[in-house]
Image: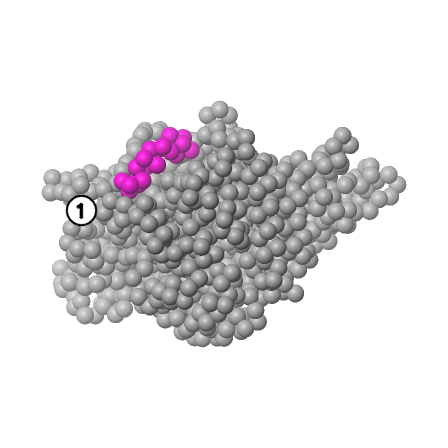
Amino acid sequence: MSVLTRDEAQTRAQFLDVQRYRIDLDLTTGGEDTFESRTVIHFTARTAGDTFVELKPATLRSVTLDGQPLDPETLTENRLALTRLTAGPHELHVDAVMNYSHTGEGLHRFTDPADGETYTYTQLFMEDVQRVFAAFDQPDLKAAFDLTVKAPDGWKVLANGITEQQADGRWRAATTPLISTYLVALAAGPWHSVTTEHAGLPFGLHCRRSLAPHLDADADELFEITRQCYDRYHEKFDEPYPFDSYDQAFVPEFNAGAMENPGLVTFRDEFVYRSAVTDTERQTRAMVIAHEMAHMWFGDLVTLQWWDDIWLNESFAEYMGYQTLNEVAHGGSGGCPPRWRGTDTWVDFGIARKAWGYDADQRPTTHPVAPAPDAVPDTASAMLNFDGISYAKGASALRQLVAWLGEKDFLAGINTHFNRHKFANATLADFIDSLASTTDRDVHAWAEQWLGTTGVDTLTPTVTETDGNWHLTVTQHGERPHRLTVGAYDRDLNDGRHLILRERFDIDVPQDETATARPGRRPALLVLNDQDLTYTKVRLDDTSAETALRSLAGVPDALTRAVLWNTLRDMVRDGELPPNAYLETARAHLAEEADLAVVQGVLAFAATQITNRYLAAADRPAALALLTDLTRALIRRTEDGSNPGLRLTAVRHFIDAAAQPDTIRGWLDEGSVPGGPELDPELRWRILTRLAVLGATDDKEIAAALATDPSATGEEGAARCRAALPTPAAKEAAWTAMFQSDSLSNYLFTATAQGFWQPEQADILKPYVTRYYEDAVPLAARRGPAIAEAAGRYAFPAPVVDADAVHLGETCLDRTDLLPALRRKLADQVDDLRRALTVRS
């Protein structure tokens, strides 16, 4: 398949003006494999010349240009040449049969095992429009879209605009404003829907019928968050919401968290909770709602010109999602659901999301937030930049920008940007010009230092005392300017376990790095970046390090504790703190931690990185025992029912750390954890997966569990359990399903891969390390980017940490035939192996 290059896109954008698409899809023919697609494109050539249109059909039946037939056989890969065009208007008709997808790309088709109902939805990002209809597929050729869909009886069709069923049975969507091709959206099936109206617009929630009771249970909460974010954005932005409705569809087997299709946002339907979740997880769902709604302005109303500016979409939505939800959470009695009203969403960002950015920025594959144009020469390379840099680091940079610029000037610049470029496209230069127009600060210099560079700075404090004052000197490893808050804490004389805030003050690094003097004795704890307003690693002076390790749970502010836990995390990853010391700190302080996001973030790092990768096999049993003791203490702490989210988190991690099956087997047999919670489907499959790893279950029990829960998540749970069984036959069957049969959907592939590699099963898994590199490369070539990414992320032999594994990975990366999506994941994974070896040593 030919990928679109930046040069080709620029040439085509100069040559063409595209006015309108008329798309007619027929989902009633072709059975389970194909559907019919007819497209009419109205466009103008500014001069005489040649160009091409993209599509990826199963069969191209006919093409006519201005009433004259073109030869379908001239379709080469995914391009149909349009030659000898005259200057002026043209009309292209394309009639094709297209393939349904089972990998979450294009028009994905899914049959729900719970009730046999079938659903389809589009994910047309980057270059998957061509899997559904013919298009000039690049973001800066915006057009209006008219969509009609013939769907089976009993189905409902959702689209970017309001849809109505016609007399002939077809569904017609309202014409869109000017949008990019990748933002066209369709969801068709027997959806269960809940609707309301707000600010004169229809709002809708949609899911498959088998999830209807769970959506109904949360509909009030989902609508409340949607309304509050909508109103808050209208307070921030001068431009009103630019589309005719706001639907949110929770769809099956979705590859991303969500997609910002204007008027029809699609979410992975794991966000329709059928099992118990924590309040932090509900907060995350609310943040995703806020994130995607921000895209309606930044991404949909104003769209990037080329994919080098993807951060303009994602960093903005990431920052705005967390910031707006935080404002909503603190906005009074009507602000948000009471279960997490008043919480600080930036704590979760700092302890979980931001770590994603830090990790990505320290790998060889890092890139600037805003890469140079020649660094994103085509769509294949652009797809690789949807990572922790474009999301977490970019959002962190914008948070720092607001701290430096001031929110008033920042929002004024944003509104200038919307006004200048609405329903059009814009570049980084346009964005910076808009910000610069509202302030006297040198935003262009800031952008060059923050957005055009790579890597993570490190700030280290030195504290001295003279003449009744204490003095702070900050040593900076890196060159970015930082506006940050410093927190000074003293011990509470009435309770030695706790600390009290003496003062917070702002400094600019490097300008103030040697000029900070404060009256009084030195604090017991000094925290750089206390409110986490900038993007940097920080270190502690010796006195502060001792205080933190002894009294971390006694720090009064959750966001400060998150900064300190991140400091310890960074020190482990940089080889400055032994992994066991992190675990002992967790055992000492998590039992008293009040913020659930902090507990979840610390336990996740302790389990997935330290226990599974950073400790040698001989040290793993002791680490699992420590985690078992820690989570048991958290379970005891929550026996009174006062903190069900903390109890659920502790139960989950107790299950995952179980080295012996007896306790969790008892829970499974009884159907409940003593004192609660009762086992819901998620906990049942979690226990059964751990029992499979320990060799304490078999295929018969797994089949019985699936018969009890014959849902899509049940099928995934069964696949995960079967792949986790420590028998040669189970491993070979799982490997064949992943790498040979090509029959697994994206979700079943991921579930199988998650079960396959287990640290406890090193001996039986050893032959598969070499086989991975032999089989992953052709798999990626056959099945495309989505499965390639899953193979690199989930099917990679991550628990095998040794020099031979690193050598195998490096040798594979020398190959010239790697699909870019697989190459990127392998490069990251191999670098993580190197880091794990360094930490172990």
Q: Identify the image quadrant of the N terminus.
A: bottom left
Q: Can residue 405 be seen in this view?
A: no
- Color theme of the render: one colour
Q: Is residue 763 magenta?
A: no
Extreme right residue here? 467
Residue found 35% across the figure and 65% down from its top: 733
Residue 685: x and y in percent read 41, 48
Q: Mark 1 points at which residue?
A: 151
Q: Identify the image quadrant of the C terminus.
A: bottom right
Extreme left residue here? 168
Residue 183: x and y in percent read 33, 49
Q: Considering the whole magenta stretch, tell me its main secondary structure.
A: helix
Residue found 57% across the figure and 69% down from its top: 802
Left or right of residue 132: residue 573: right
Q: Is mark 1 on a helix, strand or loop?
A: loop
State the extent of the magenta-drawn residues as a range: 203-225
Left or right of residue 813: residue 188: left
Q: Is residue 586 visible?
A: yes
Q: Is residue 214 magenta?
A: yes
Q: Is residue 461 above or below residue 557?
A: below
Left or right of residue 271: residue 115: left
